[in-house]
Amino acid sequence: MTHMAPSAHIQPSVDSTSVFKSDLFRGKVLFCTGGGSGICRGMTAAMMKHGADAVIVGRKLDRLSQTAKELSEATGRACIPVQADVRQPQALREAAAKAIETFGRIDFVICGAAGNFLAPISGVSENAFRTVIEIDTIGSYNTIKATLPHVRASRGSYIHVSATLHYRATPYQAHVSAAKAGVDALSAVLAVEEGPHGVRSNVIAPGPIDGTEGMDRLRPKDNRSSGLSIPAGRLGDVNDVANATIFLFSDAAAFITGQVLPVDGGAEHLRTQF
Ligand code: HXC
């Protein structure tokens, strides 16, 4: 079934500066894995625009450094790039220590580092399957372990970047589906265990977000901007995820924990594989 979207019957995404107070996160510190590019870069930019300083963590130092420089220039906030592979617990502990040494606190954590490619179960190697689980699921666990004492101290909050593709069976995505289902479960248990310590944990599940590496890898180029099977009538963009991030980290979401928030323009309700 193809859903024909009327022209722009849901508004284009807005830059969050037009909706939220610009000093919302003044004095707070964000720790974000995968923050060098894509959706997590946009989430970090939005947090900095609202007053937070940031530590961005990833494997590629060149890209991280460039992003940190650009975000600092654009927002006037501090952004520290730290090279670390989320599969390495010690590297993450050192990244968290760097955040404390630089800023003295960690209030918010985005577990965003992820790997993805299209491959059938019959074709994906054991190492390839394990690699995605290690980056997405175990990498999130490693990030939680490295940051939790600091997030407890600040009575802070986690956002895990997941997906919607594991709600139903998505061909060629067994590795990512298994990994993201694990991420959702991890976040829910974290919320339940840490609630009494004042720590919240939620998941943002982006749907089809335009202009990201994930979409570039998963969506055929000639169909990129159609938005035909999305009730909102358009693809998402990074601002849509950034706005959800600001809300979930803000005190407006103080009683929201252990939840999954799809940011998909309603696409999951309409998804079909026929
Ligand atoms: C089949 C592949 C493959 C591919 C890698 N492998 N790419 N197998 N098809 N396209 C296999 C390799 O052959 C190897 O197995 C194993 O995976 C590990 O690959 P390496 O390159 O050695 O590992 P590494 O350098 O750690 O990088 C792996 C990776 C990277 C992180 C998965 O290839 C990658 O995909 N990076 C992109 C990151 C990305 O797109 N992030 C956005 C995610 S978006 P063998 O057996 O040969 O040793 C997202 C949301 C999805 O997740 C939802 C969107 C709608």
Image (cartoon, rainbow, N blue to C red):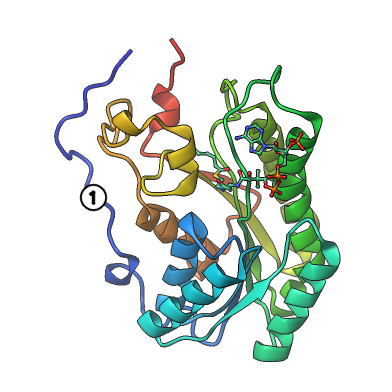
The residue positioned farthest toward the right in the image shown = 90
Q: How many marks?
A: 1
Amino acid type, residue under disc 1 in the picture: Pro
Whether residue 150 is visible here, answered yes or no, is: no
> Which residue shows up at 58% across the image and 59% down it?
255
Q: In the rendering, at what x and y percent does residue 113 appear?
A: 63, 55
What residue sits 21% from the left and 28% below the top? 5
Q: Which of 73 and 160 is in front in this view?
A: 73
Residue labelled 1 has its Cβ within 8 Å of some atom of ligand 1: no
Label 1 CA crowd tier, 10 Å (few <14, some 14–19, many 20+): some
Residue for point 46% across, 81% down: 69
Residue 82 drawn at (x, y percent): 66, 75
Q: Residue furthest front?
A: 62
- Quarter assignment of residue 143: bottom right
From this viewpoint, is residue 245 visible?
yes
Q: Which residue lies furthest to the left in this view?
A: 7
Q: Where is residue 259 in the image (x, y as percent from the top left)?
A: 60, 47
Q: Quadrant of the C terminus?
A: top left
Question: Left or right of 205: which side holds 191?
Answer: right
Is residue 13 rendered to the left or right of residue 94? Answer: left
Residue 58 position within the rendered picture, expressed as x and y whole percent measured from the top left: 64, 64
Label 1 secondary element: loop
Q: Which of 151 and 168 is in front in this view?
A: 168
Up the image or down, 216 lies above or below 170; here it is below
Q: Which residue lies furthest to the top in this view?
A: 274
**Residue of label 1:** 12
Q: Quadrant of ligand 1?
A: top right
Look at 49% across and 85% down and name the residue there: 26
Q: Nearer the viewer, residue 59 or 184?
A: 59
Q: Quadrant of the N terminus?
A: top left
